[in-house]
Image (spheres, grey):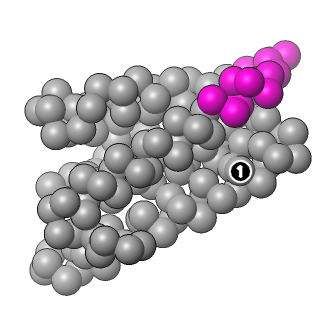
Amino acid sequence: MSEERLRELIRLRMAQAAETLHEAQILLAEHAGRGAANRAYYTMFYAVLAVLATKGLGSSKHSGTISLFDREFVKSGDLPKELSRALHMAFERGQQADYGELIRLDEPVATRTVEEAEMFVQKVRDYLTARGLLPSDP
């Protein structure tokens, strides 16, 4: 993949992350915790896809994508461990909210998940910007 195509893909994925974060914030404001948690996880997922693209990596499964992120960026020390924890928790909360029976995410948990998604996207954006893969002003 050419450098310009890589930058285009990264910009696209980060734009998806920003749009999905906005959706999560709207749902949270409307007290729709389940939907907010789902969109918060996808916010992080799109940011992960952006950063994995820098190494030409991807997976057809969410669990594989998360494992690649942990192996390539967290274990290497390129990105902080708190991002891995936030991603794993958001994935788990999303799974519970979407597929768990009689599971209801309370508002503080949904709020925390959205806040972690905000932090996650910012840290990934900072990482990509520092490497010259994103402009300083998104």
Residue appearing at x 38%, y 74% in the figure: 137
Q: Residue at x 16, y 40 (%)?
A: 78
Asked if 12 appears above or below 95 in the picture, the reply is below
Residue 29 appearing in the image: yes
Categorize mark 1 by other alpha carbons within 10 Å: few (<14), some (14-19), many (20+): many
Q: Is residue 137 left or right of residue 56?
A: right
Q: Is residue 95 visible?
A: no
Outermost front residue: 137
Give how far across and how far down residue 75 sits, in percent.
16, 27
Q: Name the residue under label 1.
A: 25
- Horizontally, residue 97 falls left or right of residue 44, namely right
- Quadrant hosting residue 109: top right
Relative to the observer, which residue lies in front, 5 or 22? 22
Where does the C terminus fall, quadrant-wise?
Answer: bottom left
The segment highlighted magenta reads 100-112
Q: Quadrant of residue 112?
A: top right
Residue at 55% from the left image edge and 31% from the top image edge: 90
Residue at image coords 41%, 51%: 122
Up-down relation of residue 33 to residue 108 (above or below): below
